Image (spheres, grey):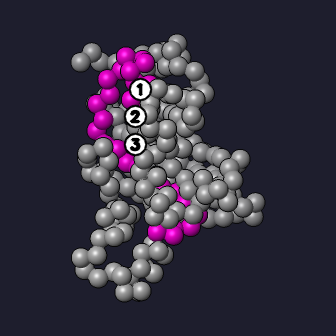
Amino acid sequence: MISVNNQTIIERLKSRVNTDFYKLINDNNIVLKEKKRNIQANNGGAFEISVSVPEGFSILFELEGENKIAFLKIKNCADGVIIHINEDETLSVHIIECKSKLNDKEWLKVKKQFEGAMLRFKSICGIIDYVPIVKNITVYTAFREDKVTREEEATFFLGKGEVGNTNISNLVFDWFDDSIIFMGKKIRHKKLQLSINAENIGIGNITLI
């Protein structure tokens, strides 16, 4: 594989990709914001998340939107993808999605959004002639209200949680773990309970690992 250094990646992004798709991270902290969402529609609500980024070269990709990478069949996409290029030129990929009320159905959708975000990122790599060597992937779910846990607890206490009952567990069991199966591989999953400030904005902090 021909090595592509950080400067080459920047030059190719600038020459081939619209700047509304990405932001170069020049600081060790970046804030993801969304203030125009309808909380009642359960699509995230307003949020403001401070993300601590490792030292070195990182890029934030904002790939959500039906008009972005329109040729992909999967239209779901997470709120943000942050890539960190390690010293050995491998990538650490971090995918972040925010939800308002996260229930069983929404958790299944979130996993599709993680996958869609990764596919869109790989599409960008193709556009700039860059073959990424992904060292690790971590996904993050930020939420205002965890209804998955509440629904599962209710199911158990109603007597539907006996050993061998797989009506729900096969769909959402990974919510209770610190990893999920993602595109055929086991990867880390981190959860973040958002706090609600006086302006009804969900706020929180994520440290990329």
For the residue pair 158 and 78, the one nearer the viewer reads as: 158
**Image point 65% across, 47% down: which residue?**
34
Pointer 3 residue: 115
Q: CA distance from mark 1 to mark 2?
A: 6 Å
Whole-percent x, y for residue 102 in the image? 52, 62
Whole-percent x, y for residue 36 in the image? 71, 47
In this image, 178 relative to 194: left or right?
A: left
**Are the residues flagged by discs 1 and 2 in contact, CB closer than 8 Å?**
yes
Of labels 3 and 1, earlier in sequence is 3
How packed mark 2 is, by other alpha carbons closer than 10 Å (few <14, some 14-19, many 20 or more), is: some
Q: Which residues are magenta?
A: 121-148
**Image point 51% across, 70% down: which residue?**
147
Quadrant housing residue 23? top right
Q: CA distance from mark 3 to mark 1?
A: 12 Å
Quadrant housing residue 3? top left
For the residue pair 186 and 157, the one nearer the viewer reads as: 157
Query: Which secondary structure, mark 3?
Result: helix
Whether residue 60 is visible to the viewer of this picture, yes or no, is no
**Are the residues flagged by discs 2 and 3 in contact, CB closer than 8 Å?**
yes
Pointer 1 residue: 123
Pointer 2 residue: 119
- Name the amino acid, label 3: Glu
Whole-percent x, y for residue 119 in the image? 40, 34
- Name the amino acid, label 2: Leu
